[in-house]
Amino acid sequence: MIAEVLGAIFIVIGVVFSALGVVGILRLPDTYSRLHASGKTSTLGVLFICLGTAFLRPSAILELLALSIFIIFSGPVGSHAIAAAVHRGTEALNEESQEQGKDATTTSGVHRNIKEYLPTIADTSASDTQ
């Protein structure tokens, strides 16, 4: 009985963390902040859900442990890869704005809108293939 209550509480905590991550993605102003919100909260959300499931299904503890280890190691790697891609896109945007004579400080930083970022990716990949 106590294990079921603890399992349900941990699952609810995990769902709340995951929901807060979604709110962070929707409400935060720039890509790096959104990435931080999604990376931290999704990892904690999944770990709490795994912990709650371990209380409800003790026979699945090994699988849940393997999943938790995978999430702990792959979450930061994925976040770093996304941040590096955004940084490369920002550098390309800064170089382009300097060539056009625009002030790089007004166009530097993080892309707030995906429509601004997609042409930069296309231009960067086209120049890499040449």
Image: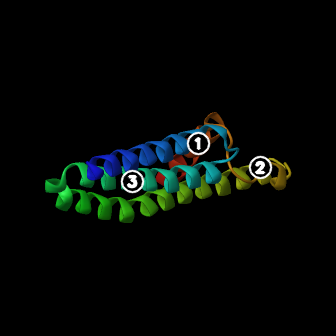
Q: Which residue is mark 1?
A: 25
Whole-number angstrom distance, CA of label 3 to CA of label 2: 45 Å
Estimate the x, y position of residue 69 in percent, counting from the top left. 31, 65
The amino acid type found where label 2 is placed reads Ser
Task: Name which residue lies at 49% across and 47% down.
Answer: 17
Question: How busy is the neighbourhood of tag 3: few (under 14 within 10 Å), some, or many (20 plus)?
Answer: many
The tag on residue 97 is 2
The amino acid type found where label 1 is placed reads Ile
Give the SS element for disc 3.
helix
Task: Name which residue lies at 61% across and 37% down.
Answer: 26
The amino acid type found where label 3 is placed reads Phe
Total number of numbered discs in the rendering: 3
Whole-number angstrom distance, CA of label 3 to CA of label 1: 20 Å
> Upstream in the sequence, badge 3 or badge 1?
1
Question: How busy is the neighbourhood of tag 1: few (under 14 within 10 Å), some, or many (20 plus)?
Answer: some
Estimate the x, y position of residue 66 in percent, counting from the top left. 23, 62
Q: Which residue is mark 3?
A: 48
Task: Name which residue lies at 37% across and 56% down.
Answer: 47
Give the SS element for disc 1.
helix
